[in-house]
Amino acid sequence: MSDETKQRPRIITVASGKGGVGKTSFCVNLAIALSQFGKRVLIADADFGLSNVDVMLGVMTKYNIAHFLRGQRTMDEIVQIGYDGVRFISGGTGADDLLGITPEQLDEVIAGFSGIEMPLDYIICDAGAGIGEAVIKLAQASDEIFAVLTPEPTSATDAYALIKYVQRRAPDRQISIVMNRVTNMRDSEGIAGGFTDMIYRTQGRRVDTLGFIREDTGVPASIRNQTPHMVGAPASKFSLDVKVIARILLGLPPLREQTGFFRRIFTRASYAILGEESADVQDSGYGRFRTERVVSDFVENQLAASRSASADPFPARAERSANDPPDARVVEEAARIFSEISPPTAKPEVRRDEVRPEPPSARPAPEPAAKPAIKPL
């Protein structure tokens, strides 16, 4: 195929502020969902030296990134095939030369990803957890970045620091969040709304909520069995939610049965339709994001202070280099915000017509039964 007719694949980097949020599982199952829609997908495991994609696919790989760096194989030659025709490149496990990969080698690997000769529609890069140079360089080489987080405050705090750092180093890249392991949809919508609103007000950057993936107790078992959940349980909650995200990426309309929960998913298209203000979002049918007032108050105070002191909403970071990682103040402030916007545990409501039995200790002791009267003879 000539260079003029070859279609350039869309490169997506999937990252997370912390480990254990289901990032690799999301990458694998999203790739399978896109493949089931007829797309040619490659997963590039960029967690060098700690690869897990091959483990989740149940494939014993013969070649990995180390063979490419040593000049033993080309990038196309180390590509393996997994479920539903999904191709992947293993990042290797335990290799010393991968655990200590140099910046020059990293540039070589990223250039190798972009220069793959086989026809592809999507390249999904599974980046390592946290903030590092590999994540930043992958983001710079990608078309867009997905940040995976959970409704937990620790995950949201680390994701906030990740997005802030990526936005500083790759300001022209589209960033979206995926909320995984959702147990309460309404609470998760509120957290996602507060999260994206805070980023917009502090950084002037619109971050989309790509979708929500509900907690599914069958996912851990599928990982143990080394069978992707999209393959072993295609009708499960997890699989259905991943398919919704795949349809959004492909620009396909929602299915008729995708009502209620699915229609509350706030996609990137809704921003163009509804405008910039969060009030419009709250009034729309796309999502009822309960942006807590504490977020707006905090941001407004920071911005007011910055007008008189510094152009940076976080004055303590004003003297730092643009290439330095986020400082402790950013993480501390984010942690405080998320501890305040996290919805409290709802108490069970008691209906007025509902009569609850009193506990045994509160009940009066029953009176002894009266003895029958004895008639005289």
Image (tube, grey):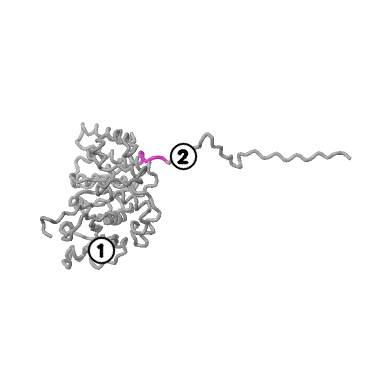
Neighbour tally class for label 2: few under 14, some 14-19, many 20 plus, Cα within 10 Å: few
Residue found 17% across the figure and 67% down from its top = 73
* Disc 2 residue type (three-letter): Lys
Q: Disc 2 on helix, strand or loop?
A: loop
Residue at x 26% of width, y 46% of height: 176
Q: Report the amino acid beneath label 1.
A: Ile
Query: Mark 1 to mark 2: distance in Å?
Result: 50 Å
Residue placed under numbered mark 2 in the picture: 347
Quick check: 326 above or below 88? above
Which of 184/138 is in front?
A: 184
In depth, the one of 300 and 243 nearer the eye is: 243
Q: Nearer the viewer, residue 26 or 5?
A: 5
Left or right of residue 358: residue 330: left
**Mark 1 secondary-structure assignment:** strand
Which sits earlier in the primary sequence, circle 1 or circle 2? 1
Residue 8, position in %: x, y? 16, 54
Q: Identify the image quadrant of the C terminus.
A: top right
Question: Mark 1 = which residue?
Answer: 81
Residue 175 position within the rendered picture, expressed as x and y whole percent measured from the top left: 23, 46
- The answer to whether residue 156 is above or below residue 310 is below
Residue found at the very far right of the displayed protein: 377
The part of the chain drawn in magenta is: 339-344
Write down the quadrant of residue 225 in the picture: bottom left
Report the side of 289 relative to 200 (left or right).
Answer: right
Q: Which mark is nearer the camera, 1 or 2?
A: 1
